[in-house]
Image (tube, grey):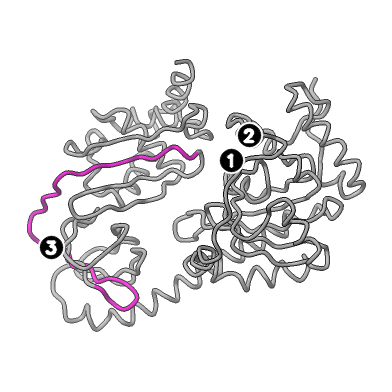
Amino acid sequence: MANPPVNVAQLAAVDAARAARMLSEVRAAKLAGQRARIPARPVIEQSWERVLRRGMDPEHGGTAGLLAPEEVRRRREETPLRHVLPVLREGLLSFADVAHHIMVVADAEGRVLWREGSSPVLRKADAIGFELGADWREDVVGTNGVGTPAVVRGPVQVFAGEHFVRTQTTWTCTGAPITDPRDGRLIGVVDVSGPLETMHPATLAWVSSVAKLAEARLREVHLSSLERLRAVAAPVLARLGGRAVVVDRDGWTAAVTGMPYLSRVALPKSPAAGRRWLPALGLCSVEPLAGGWLVRVAEEPVVRGATRIVLDLTQPRRSSVTVSADSGTWSHELSPRHAELLFLLATYRAGLGAARLAAEMFGDPRRTVTVRAEVSRVRRYLGGLLEHRPYRFCEGAEVEVLLPADPRDLLPHSTAPGVLDRRVSASVR
């Protein structure tokens, strides 16, 4: 009978050196293709498997150049993370400095935008490339407290030999993702790192809690901005007839008139004034408004023209759909469930009835109510591009699916029978 994974947090709190030696043995066994006496934790084992499949060098990791200082400044100015820095500093920094840790904040692409905390630890971080502008994605530098939480979309503590790259094995790193509370999109990761002897079992819960506080602050910022836009929009909408909606720069609705409420309008990547075809609304007149856009829905019939839909599944944890039409291009990041649904509809271009789609997604053809609810949610941003009876992409649209290089990375945490069948069939080709 196999031994259970060691409780690293409890062991390291008592004897960090012993825990580090044990994990070093586990790591060495994994790299040698041997069975370890004590298995790695599942989250670490799965991360090692991902980086091994990419052929990463465990001695040095991958390489990615530093961002130029001006690019770091640009990203700092544009990322929503700038709104939560005070929350992160208040919640983490004072304690991190005392505990000989540093706080690191990276964007959704794993680029380090801020580093603060203990000066000696910052100098040690420089020695392993953990510096401003560095790329700490998992597929670049291996299992770590920035890249791995971004992949699994949850808090992760990586201690000593749980790091894949040898130069990082004298560190303990604890990171948690920060997501956009409006749509669940990953916007960055906050990490607390330090020498392995500073490991504490409570650090994971601490960092995770502060990340949640940061997300709550983002929600407050969003609601406040919509309130300001609503005040600007009120006199404008009062003078209009017909259907219109006022949205912020990201498409979130502040106010509507003459039409049902929509939580969000899918805008082109680079919205501009003029006539545009928008999903769920059709042909619209788009006009700038302080802090957002006034969208007036045209009443005449809509001619969409050529439409191309690209379903990007190349990133295991970050699927998206991009629609290109005569009026512009827009993208939407997909939840895991919606990625499954659109993949199945792209596979079965002739369409699927509710019962068949339920069987492909849940293994149970009776779950038609759940399927209809999910399709309804997808139609909020794809609108008329999805048809029903049966469910399918509209006939005139060109649909392309971008798949990962390794079939095992196709929606890796999906349990949908329709996805599993295609993952297996692709693997044996």
User: Would residue 338 be found to the left or right of residue 175 on screen?
Assistant: left
User: In the rendered structure, does residue 146 fall within the stretch colored magenta?
Assistant: no
Estimate the spatial distance between the alpha carbons at disc 2 and disc 3, rounded to whole Å: 54 Å
**Residue mark closest to the camera, 2 vs 3:** 2
In the depicted view, which residue is nearer to us: 358 or 196? 196
Amino acid type, residue under disc 2 in the picture: Met
- First along the sequence among labels 3 and 1: 1
Q: Secondary structure at mark 2?
A: loop
**Up-down relation of residue 400 to residue 120 (above or below):** above
User: Would residue 293 be found to the left or right of residue 57 on screen?
Assistant: left
* Range covered by the magenta-colored residues: 288-315
Could you say which quadrant of the image residue 83 lies in?
bottom right
**Up-down relation of residue 252 to residue 35 (above or below):** below
Q: Which residue is mark 3?
A: 298
The x, y position of residue 307, in whole percent, is 20, 44
- First along the sequence among labels 1 and 2: 2
The x, y position of residue 232, in whole percent, is 31, 82
* Quadrant location, the N terminus: top right
Q: Which residue is mark 1?
A: 139
